[in-house]
């Protein structure tokens, strides 16, 4: 039996925490709202409705670029991605295919063993979200509350090679986006959703195998478990002499397995074209620097600052899970020294653990 290497790339959809949607004045917070109650004629895609770009969404994307160690494009543009889904009334999604706002970057994701995995960011682009389908046996219901929600889609390079690395990357991405104030980060309500692309190849192979994309995972554990399952599934198929089909798969949390949903399209299948209704986003260095100057300290800053405290990985993670605690510990360290900061960090960590 050959040894196989797993290769993973992740596309993460991050809902931006604006008051209104990307191109309409509708409320952008659909939590606890009745279905189809926060939707405007623009979101419905009614004839003659023209989009108006939400400037605050652009500002948040610029902040995200700093968290991703990525430059911001001086000129970026929107395109139309054509495909039919019942939860996309216009028949196309407004996105950025050719000139995305966030260029190549990278993040270092800490692993449990004290090492880290460096994951390159290919790019991140702005786009609008589609609605949500809820399936009941032989029929489905459509809720368009989410249609038009502003997103950035962060596209990684295929730099992860284990379920643990994929989980660590997803967790660090969540910390970075929430600390930067880009998103509310509510995973339960889908504020960040992970599409995990997984392929296998014999160790030493120079070409990757066909990938399967597991869509819409909204927990770090699901990212890890879906990758574990897909690796075993794909290896079993190859060992039987079968071919891995490039497809989109869903994750069944109850059964802890993936299931086939549809064949996976390539870029040319979407018939991208420039969106003539939306002017290009043109930014200056001064604008970008002013906006990024408002980004507070991010997790890597705190890890470096606390390196002299001798804290365990679990204590550091406990502090980083609460941004206000991280800020407070750093202030105590500055004003009272390492010894006091270390004691307080342990107190906080114990209190958090006892209430979990």
Image: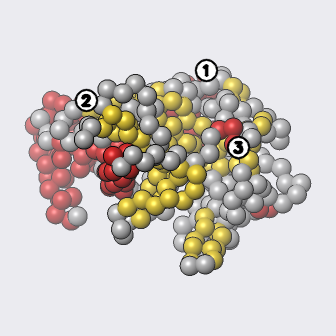
Q: Quadrant of the C terminus?
A: bottom left
**Looking at the picture, does residue 170 appear above or below residue 129?**
above
| Count of numbered circles on the image | 3
Question: Depth check: 37 or 111 in front?
Answer: 111
Left or right, residue 23 beside residue 315: right
In the rendered image, which residue does mark 3 sit on? Answer: 270
**Looking at the picture, does residue 254 appear above or below residue 239?**
below
Residue visible at 77% across and 55% down in the picture: 90
**Which mark sits nearer the N-terminus, 2 or 1?**
1
Question: Depth check: 277 or 307 in front?
Answer: 277
Choose top left, top right, bottom left or bottom right for residue 130. bottom right
In the rendered image, which residue does mark 2 sit on? Answer: 304
Residue visible at 57% across and 56% down in the picture: 262
* 2 and 1 marks in contact (CB < 8 Å): no
Residue visible at 24% across and 46% down in the picture: 317
SS assignment at label 3: helix
Q: Position of residue 214 (x, y in %)?
A: 46, 52
**Looking at the picture, does residue 210 appear above or below residue 23?**
above
**Looking at the picture, does residue 56 appear above or below residue 73?**
below
SS assignment at label 1: helix
In the rendered image, which residue does mark 1 sit on? Answer: 285
Which numbered tag is attached to residue 65? none
Left or right, residue 101 beside residue 301: right
Q: Position of residue 325 (x, y in %)?
A: 28, 48
């Amino acid at each position: 039996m050959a040894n196989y290497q797993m290769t993973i790339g992740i596309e993460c959809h991050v809902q931006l925490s604006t008051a209104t949607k990307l191109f309409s004045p509708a409320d952008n917070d659909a939590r606890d709202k009745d279905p189809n109650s926060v939707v405007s004629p623009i979101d419905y895609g009614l004839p003659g409705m023209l989009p108006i770009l939400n400037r605050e969404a652009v500002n948040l994307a610029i902040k995200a670029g700093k968290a991703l160690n990525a430059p911001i494009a001086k000129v970026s543009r929107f395109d139309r991605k054509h495909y039919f889904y019942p939860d996309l009334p216009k028949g196309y999604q407004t996105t950025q295919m050719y000139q995305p706002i966030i260029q190549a970057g990278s993040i270092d994701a800490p692993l449990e063993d004290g090492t880290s995995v460096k994951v390159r960011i290919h790019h991140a682009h702005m786009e609008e979200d589609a609605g949500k389908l809820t399936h009941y046996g032989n029929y489905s219901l459509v809720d368009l509350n989410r249609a038009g929600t502003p997103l950035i889609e962060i596209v990684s390079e295929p730099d992860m090679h284990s379920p643990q690395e994929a989980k660590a990357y997803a967790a660090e991405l969540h910390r970075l986006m929430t600390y930067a104030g880009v998103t509310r980060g509510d995973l339960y309500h889908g504020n960040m959703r992970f599409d995990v692309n997984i392929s296998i190849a014999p160790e030493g192979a120079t070409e990757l195998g066909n990938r399967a994309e597991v869509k819409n995972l909204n927990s770090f554990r699901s990212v890890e478990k879906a990758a574990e399952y897909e690796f075993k599934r794909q290896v079993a198929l190859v060992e039987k002499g079968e071919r891995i089909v490039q497809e989109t798969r869903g994750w069944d949390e109850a059964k802890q397995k993936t299931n086939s949903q549809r064949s996976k399209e390539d870029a040319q299948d979407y018939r991208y074209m420039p969106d003539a209704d939306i002017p290009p986003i043109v930014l200056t260095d001064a604008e970008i620097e002013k906006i990024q100057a408002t980004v507070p300290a991010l997790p890597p800053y705190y890890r470096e600052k606390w390196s002299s405290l001798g804290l365990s990985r679990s204590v550091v993670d406990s502090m980083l899970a609460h941004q206000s605690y991280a800020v407070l510990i750093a202030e105590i360290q500055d004003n009272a020294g390492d010894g006091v900061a270390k004691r307080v960090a342990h107190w906080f960590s114990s209190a958090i653990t006892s209430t979990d």
